[in-house]
Amino acid sequence: MRGLLVVPLLLLSAGCWSPRYFTPRENLNGTGPDGDPSAVYAVRDGDSERGEGEVRLWSGGAKAHYDDDRQVVDLHVGFELENTGDAPLKIDVASVQVEELFLGGHLQAHLEPRQVTGSGQAAPGQTARVDVFFRLATTYPSEIDSFSIRFAVRDAKGQRVGQVTPFVPGNPWRNRAMVNPPMGYSRYGRSGFYGSNGWWDGPFYRGFFYR
């Protein structure tokens, strides 16, 4: 009988620790590099309203792992800034923060990034990528109800795009199926169950899956 009780407890624990994925709730007109659904915003010249590029915003999800033997949950958000104009554009990394974060039905304080990779500087004709990670005050991704991301795109003239994008839980396989195979190998190495997402199968997250 004791063995029968252990199985439901293990299943419950696995469910709480399972990754949780999110989808932008507006401007859902594109995908990120790994197939995640993304919000797309036009970047226009403030004087002439001429199009100068676009910014794409997506989330790779929230996932649990160990950090110095502590159970933690990190939330990933990615940006791509495509510059089709004739002047440099930049994602203002200092402006990026989590707002309207609800954990288990409770509103949390704003969060600053814990880790940022990429400068966000896009020269004319180039595309820049920035990956941002937030450490959440929970040990279970399943407790994340929703959140919003505040960011801005700037150039020498000042702010071009200032935006708050809401995210809600979404189906990770809707747009990933053709990009991330269920099993096998990718350019990032062993794909594993979650496909070829380089971040989650990279050194940052490998410590959890291959402990």
Image (spheres, grey):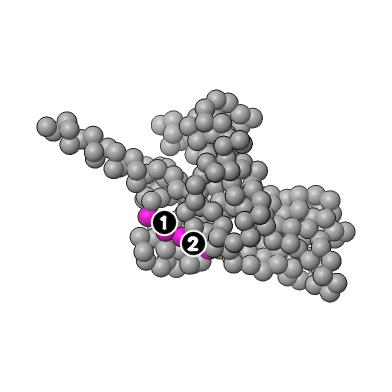
> Bounds of the magenta span?
143-149
Which residue appears farthest toward the left when viewing the image?
1
77 over 14 or under it: above or below: below
Lateral position of residue 169 relative to residue 70, left or right? right
Q: Residue at x 64, y 48 (%)?
A: 31
Write down the residue under mark 1: 144
Q: Is residue 8 visible?
A: yes
Q: Residue at x 39, y 60 (%)?
A: 103
Q: Which secondary structure type mostly characterizes the magenta part of the structure? A: strand
Label 2: which secondary element: strand
197 over 38 or under it: above or below: above
Q: Residue at x 59, y 46 (%)?
A: 36
Write down the residue under mark 2: 147
Mark 1: amino acid = Ile
Q: Residue at x 70, y 67 (%)?
A: 161
Which residue appears farthest toward the bottom when viewing the image?
47
Quadrant in which residue 184 is drawn: top right
Q: Position of residue 38 (x, y in %)?
A: 62, 53
Mark 2: amino acid = Phe
Quadrant in which residue 211 is drawn: top left
Q: Position of residue 12 (x, y in %)?
A: 29, 43
Q: CA distance from mark 2 to mark 1?
A: 8 Å
Which residue appears farthest toward the right when viewing the image?
86
Assess disc 1: are there few (<14), some (14-19) or many (≥20) residues with their C-alpha within 10 Å of its C-alpha: many
Assess disc 2: are there few (<14), some (14-19) or many (≥20) residues with their C-alpha within 10 Å of its C-alpha: many
207 over 100 or under it: above or below: above
Which residue appears farthest toward the top when viewing the image?
184
Quadrant in which residue 187 is drawn: top right
Residue 10 highlighted magenta (yes or no): no
Q: Position of residue 152 (x, y in %)?
A: 67, 65
